[in-house]
Amino acid sequence: MSYIDDIKKRPIKEDAIILAIESSCDETACAILRGRTELLSSEIESSMTEHIKFGGVVPEIASRAHTAAISIVVERALKNANVQLNQIDAVAVTYGSGLLGALLVGVSYAKALAYALKVPLIPVSHIRGHLAAIYLADDKLQPPFISLLASGGHTAIIDVKSYSEFEILGGTLDDAVGEAFDKVARVLGLSYPGGPNVERLALEGANSIELPKMLKGKEGYDFSYSGLKTAVINYVHNCEQKAIEVNKADVARSFQHAAVEVLVKKSVKAAIERGRTVVTAGGGVVANGYLRFLLEKTCEKKGIRAVLPPKKLCTDNAAMIAAEGYIQYLKGNFADLDLNAVARVKFE
Ligand SMILES: Nc1ncnc2c1ncn2[C@@H]1O[C@H](COP(=O)(O)OP(=O)(O)OP(=O)(O)O)[C@@H](O)[C@H]1O
Ligand SMILES: [Mg+2]
C-alpha cells in the first residue's frame, strides 16, 4: 500500500500533536501544537544578520542557513515541548509562497519526517498561516470576522467567512505595506528589516510632514503604497538637494502614521459594512505598536472586538503554520510524497 493510501485510513484525533516547519524566507522555525490551541513549543533560528549587509534577504544564503539550522531547530522544539518523535500525529510544512530554495529545505525535511514516522504530511500556505496565528491568541475565536493581512509581501482586507472560506475585499495595487516600511527605512539610512527600525525612530518624532492621501477619492478596500513611499523618498531627496537638514524621526513618524491609519480605517469600515463584530490581523507589520494601538482604539470606539496575535506570532514563525496545519488536518487535507515547493501560492 502506498504511503498516502495508508495515511488516509488513519482516524483523525481532536487532540493531535502537530509538528510544523516554516522555512519560506530567512527564518528556520519549528513548532509543536497539541489540539487547536495548546502551543507546546515554538523555536526560530534566523539568518537575518547574514543578510543585513546586503540590505535584504539573499536567497542562496538563506537556503544554506536553513540546511544548517533545520535539524537543530526541530530537536529544540521537541525538547522544549517535552515530546518524543513517536508522539507526533502529523507534520505540517509551509510549501509556498516564498523563496523556492528556502522552501525546499523545509518541504524535503517534512516529507522525510512524515514518511519515517508514517504520519500525515500537511501542506500549508504561508499566508493562510499568518491569518491562522490569531487562533493561538484566542482559543474561543471562530469565523466569521474581518482580517487585516499586513506583511512584507501582502496587504489585504479579507472577510473570513469560515475556516476555509475567504473573500478578499481589497488589496494593494502595487507595493505591500511591509515593503514600503523597508524602503522608507533604507532612504532614512536604517538597516534591514526596516519596519521595527522605523517604528523605533518614529517614537522620537512628530507627525508633522504632509504626505499624499492614498487613492484619494476612492472609497474601496484597495491600497497603494508606492505613491506614499515615493513621496517620502522625494521629500528626503529634496531636503538634501536644498541642504535642509532632514528630521528623520519626523519622517519616520509621519510615514508610519499615513501607512497605518489607512489600514485601520479600511479594516473597521469593512467590519461595519459586513456586519462583523470582530476584526483580526496577521503578518509582520501587525507587530507595529502604533498599528496595534490605533486598531484597538478605533475598534473600541465602534463597539467592535479587535483580536491581535502576540507580536512574536506576527512575523514569520512555525506556530502559525501549526495552527493552520491543524485546520487542514481536521479536513484530512494531506499531501503525498511528491509535494513540491511553490514560489507563489494563490491565496484562496
Ligand atoms: N514593528 C514593525 N513595524 C512595521 N513593520 C514591521 C514591524 N516588524 C516587522 N515589520 C515588517 O514586516 C515584514 C515582515 O513580515 P513577514 O515576515 O510577515 O513578511 P514576509 O514573510 O517577508 O512576507 P509574506 O508573509 O507576505 O510572504 C517586513 O517588511 C518588516 O519590515
Ligand atoms: Mg510572512
Image (cartoon, grey):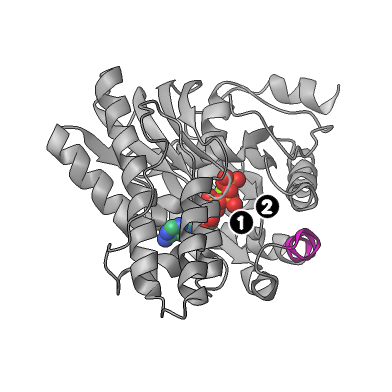
Using the rendered image of the protein, determine whether residue 83 is visible from the camera's viewpoint.
Answer: no
Q: Position of residue 99 (x, y in %)?
A: 73, 49
Viewer-side residue, 201 vs 145: 201
Disc number at residue 42? none
Q: Which residue is mark 1?
A: 29
In the rendered structure, the answer to whether residue 307 lies left or right of residue 81 reads left
First along the sequence among labels 1 and 2: 2
Q: In percent of the image, x 71 and y 65: which residue is there? A: 69
Q: Position of residue 212 (x, y in %)?
A: 39, 48
In the rendered structure, the answer to whether residue 98 lies left or right of residue 329 reads right
Say if mark 1 contacts mark 2, CB within 8 Å: yes
Disc number at residue 23? 2
Quarter of the image for the C terminus: give it: top right
Q: In percent of the image, x 52 and y 29: which residue is there? A: 327
Q: Position of residue 178 (x, y in %)?
A: 51, 52
Give the magenta-colored segment's residue range.
58-67
